[in-house]
Image: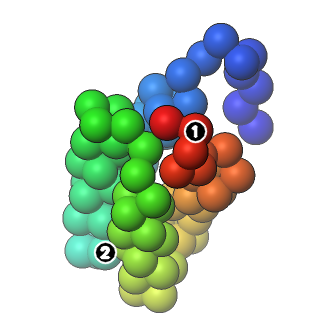
């Protein structure tokens, strides 16, 4: 559980979580290693350019690939928080 106030930037929180998964993956399976690295790059772009629905769509597609192909629970759960936050708190009209 992560508790933050409304003063925190949600994209910074997403980047922090993403950075954790990129650093902590064992690197054995390609989907987890490269999928999480790609998600971090997308989030960095989101930080620079603002939210676009396409980012959520691409992360959703990466999430599905990781869920299907990751070898362990770490990889299979790595994108859940990020995608959940994008799904619940980001909308095209907000940014």
Residue at x-position 34% and y-position 42%: 46
Q: CA distance from mark 1 to mark 2?
A: 31 Å
Residue 30 picture quarter = bottom left
Q: Residue furthest front?
A: 93
Q: How is the protein colored in the picture?
A: rainbow
The location of residue 18, given as percent across then percent down, is 42, 44
Query: Residue 40 got which mark?
Result: none
Residue at x-position 52% and y-position 50%: 92
Task: Count residues near mark 2 (Cα–Cα under 10 Å), then give few for <14, some for 14-19, many for 20+.
Answer: many
The location of residue 50, given as percent across then percent down, is 37, 37
The location of residue 28, given as percent across then percent down, is 27, 70
* Residue 18, placed above or below residue 72: above
Q: Is residue 5 left or right of residue 14?
A: right
* Residue 22, placed above or below residue 32: above
Return the residue nearer the eye: 7 or 95: 95
Which residue is identified by label 2?
Answer: 31
Q: Is residue 33 left or right of residue 84?
A: left
Which mark's residue is nearer the viewer, 1 or 2? 1
Residue 37: in sight, yes or no? Answer: yes
- Give the mark, 1 or 2, whose residue is nearer the N terminus: 2
Total marks placed: 2
Which residue is identified by label 1?
Answer: 94
């Amino acid at each position: 559980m992560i508790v933050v106030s409304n003063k925190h930037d949600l994209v910074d929180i997403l980047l922090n979580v993403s950075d954790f998964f990129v650093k902590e993956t064992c690197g054995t399976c390609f989907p987890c290693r490269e999928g999480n690295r790609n998600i971090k790059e997308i989030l960095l772009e989101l930080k620079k350019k603002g939210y676009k629905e396409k980012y959520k769509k691409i992360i959703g597609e990466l999430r599905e690939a990781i869920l299907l192909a990751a070898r362990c629970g770490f990889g299979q759960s790595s994108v859940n928080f990020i995608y959940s936050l994008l799904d619940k708190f980001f909308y095209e009209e907000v940014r």
